[in-house]
Image: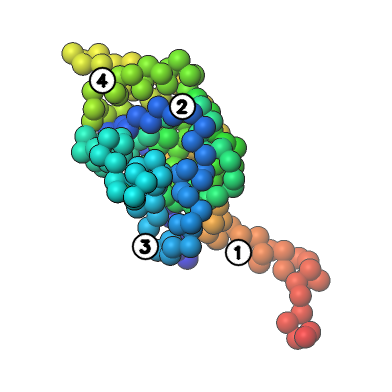
Amino acid sequence: MAQAMLRPLTRLTAIAAPLPLANVDTDQLLPARFMRRPRGDGYHPYLLHDLAHDAEGRPDPDFVLNRPDYAGAGILVARRNFGGGSSREGAVYALVDAGFRVIIAPGFGDIFRANALKNGMLPVALDEAVVDRLLTALAASPGATVSVDLPEQTVTLPMGAGRAEVFGFEVDPFRKDLLVRGLDEIGLTLSLADEIAGYAEVRTRHEPWVVPDSRIT
């Protein structure tokens, strides 16, 4: 039986985009009016739409995600309370569809964090002072890359001349395992299909009364 798969996340080195804003909520990440659009078309055009566009709906060339230096960014660095607000899972869809695999911030909305992990995106919480240093370094070197090692639970910021700063982070072991394996809960269940079938066979043989009689309607 096929498993429900996400892209495994182990080690990622990618352009990191600095978003030095606190309290970026789910309505900013994906304004509600765009949730009527088909998910199959991708929600990436609407990510942070009202921050990325002017009042006439034209892209703001100065907004970080509109700048060529950050094209193809896979890591977003923001300030505290990222993803607060509603339980809007579409906010995570917009980030994932835009290519982000890791979000770094001092803290996250609880529901946003859960939705991110379930969709193959890693929220990394670092101390506010560390995030400030990351934001400063990224602003000074547009297009710079950051490395995230999920098995080792580290974030590495190259400093030039062979130097680097390494920061550790915490992640729930169960969620870490799913991310590394590229599985969601459905995929995990399907990966255990043989064990589940074996258990059902044994249970049916030894306790047949627990199995509904298909003849009963």
Disc 3 marks a residue whose amino acid type is Asp
- C-alpha distance separating marks 3 and 2: 29 Å
Image check: 29 left or right of 75?
Answer: right
Task: Name the quarter where the C terminus is drawn.
Answer: bottom right
Residue at the spot 25% in from the left edge and 16% down from the top edge: 159
Q: Which mark is residue 41?
A: 3
Dot 2 lies on which element? loop
- Count of numbered tags: 4
Q: Which of the two marks, 2 or 1, is nearer to us in this view?
A: 2
Q: Which label belongs to residue 197?
A: 1
Q: Given the image, on which type of amino acid does mark 2 rest?
A: Arg
Residue indicated by mark 4: 140
Answer with mark 2 or mark 1, whichever residue precedes in sequence: 2
Q: Nearer the viewer, residue 114 or 77?
A: 77
Tag 2 and tag 1, C-beta contact below 8 Å: no
Q: Nearer the viewer, mark 3 or mark 1?
A: 3
**Precedes in sequence: disc 3 or disc 4:** 3
Q: Could you tell me which secondary element the residue under label 4 belongs to? A: helix
Say whether residue 35 is visible.
Answer: yes
Q: Nearer the viewer, mark 1 or mark 4?
A: 4
| Residue drawn at point x = 46 percent, y = 27 percent | 79
Task: Give, as a three-letter code, the residue at label 1.
Answer: Ala
Residue closest to the far front: 56
Residues at circles 3 and 2 in contact by the CB criterion of under 8 Å: no
The residue lying at 38 percent from left, 31 percent from top is 19
- The answer to which of marks 2 and 4 sits earlier in the sequence is 2
Tell me which residue sits at (75%, 72%) in the image. 211
- The circle drawn on residue 79 is 2
Among the 4 quarters of the image, the one containing residue 69: top left
